[in-house]
Image: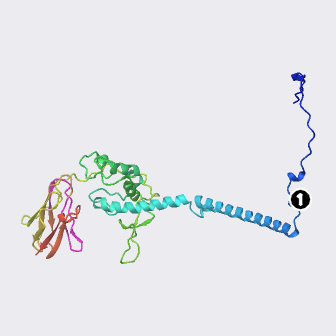
Amino acid sequence: MTDEPGREPEQRLPARRPPSEAAPVERFSAPPTAHKFELTPERAAGIVRQSASARWVGLIATIVVGLFLILYWFYELGAPLELSTARLDQQADFQQVTAVERGYNLYQANCARCHGKQGEGGIGPVLNDDSKLYLHLSPAYLETVLTVGGRYVCGNANSLMPIWSNLGSPPGPLNYIQIEELIAFMRSDANRTYNVRDPELNEPIVDPATGENETFPGWYDAEWRPAPDATPVPACYLGDAGGNGGGATPPPDAPVLEVVAEGIAYDVKELEAPAGTTFVIHFENKDASVPHDVDIRLGDGTVVADNALVKTVGDANYVIDGLDAGTYTFICSAHPIPAMTGTLTVK
């Protein structure tokens, strides 16, 4: 701004400045040697080769990823025309087989003594029966019976069928997983065989006689249908209520052997009977709602006398035809334990 005396402020104009020279170009530019863009033929050919190689690598990677996705798709969902099974279906089948084999061990440990090793029945009703498995013994029904006990079946508070589920009242010994496995065994496919596994190691048990794995068949035949005029399976099963277990009328002069069961134990461990002479075992059951009997067997387990159960408090006369001289075992078929096992000497 000018600041000459005598001028008004509005008359004060910017002072003129002498023109300045432009800065040299070199100040803002790279040296001329940096502006050489020419490629040698060798360098150009190398770039082309690298570009072609990169395109081939990209194409191969795309093909590999595509094949992987296709194969993984078929692995997960199964190949067309049922050439393979979907992974989830394979895992579901494997888990079902595992549940059945574990359920078999649970059944043998807890249920077989009343319902038979293959569900053929005994103290309890038959389970391995197509007419029952068709509709009556459904998974929901079995789960309910295992949870609330036999009173659900017949409304009998004194039913011999106990509560097995730990969700019952009072709680039973099996958790919900074990209940599911037990039901899986009883509803297993009758057209398949399963391995018997060691309960502790979960390894297949090998039959020493054959060297092959021990197996068991399933029970449920999904193709079975009842006859049109078949009688429906009753919802309630009750055997004899107990009391006198029956037996033939003994000869008046037959020797009588006394056996009492109380507290799930016999009161005697030794019995003697004359050889070749009919004798009577007078058996008294003092355990309410607990079945007992007195069977006679050989040392190898062969049954000589298979007597009827006395299912609650009561008595029975078991008439035994004359036996050969020797040593026999008398035992409770419902509770084959040391406390209910003794020796019968015939001489």
Q: Quadrant of residue 128?
A: bottom left
Q: Residue furthest left?
A: 253
Position above or below: 159 against 192: above
Foreground of the two, 156 or 56: 56
Q: How is the image coloured?
A: rainbow
Is residue 324 visible from the viewing direction of this image? no
Quarter of the figure that contains the C terminus:
bottom left
**At x 19% / y 66%, what residue is drawn?**
338
Quarter of the figure that contains the N terminus:
top right
Residue 304 point in image, percent of width and height: 21, 70
Residue 310 point in image, percent of width and height: 19, 57
Q: Secondary structure at mark 1?
A: helix
Residue 136 point in image, percent of width and height: 38, 51
Foreground of the two, 166 or 255: 166
Q: How many marks?
A: 1
Q: Quadrant of residue 219?
A: bottom left
User: What segment is highlighted magenta in the picture?
Assistant: 292-317
- The majority secondary structure of the magenta stretch comes to loop
Q: Is residue 299 magenta?
A: yes
Q: Residue at label 1? A: 32
Position above or below: 306 against 132: below
Residue 118 point in image, percent of width and height: 34, 63
Q: Quadrant of residue 207?
A: bottom left
Position above or below: 251 against 244: below
**At x 76% / y 64%, what residue is drawn?**
54
**At x 63% / y 62%, what residue is drawn?**
71
Is residue 169 visible from the viewing direction of this image? yes
* Amino acid type at mark 1: Pro
Q: Is residue 342 magenta?
A: no
Q: Residues within 10 Å of mark 1 (few under 14, many from 20)?
A: few
Foreground of the two, 298 or 105: 105
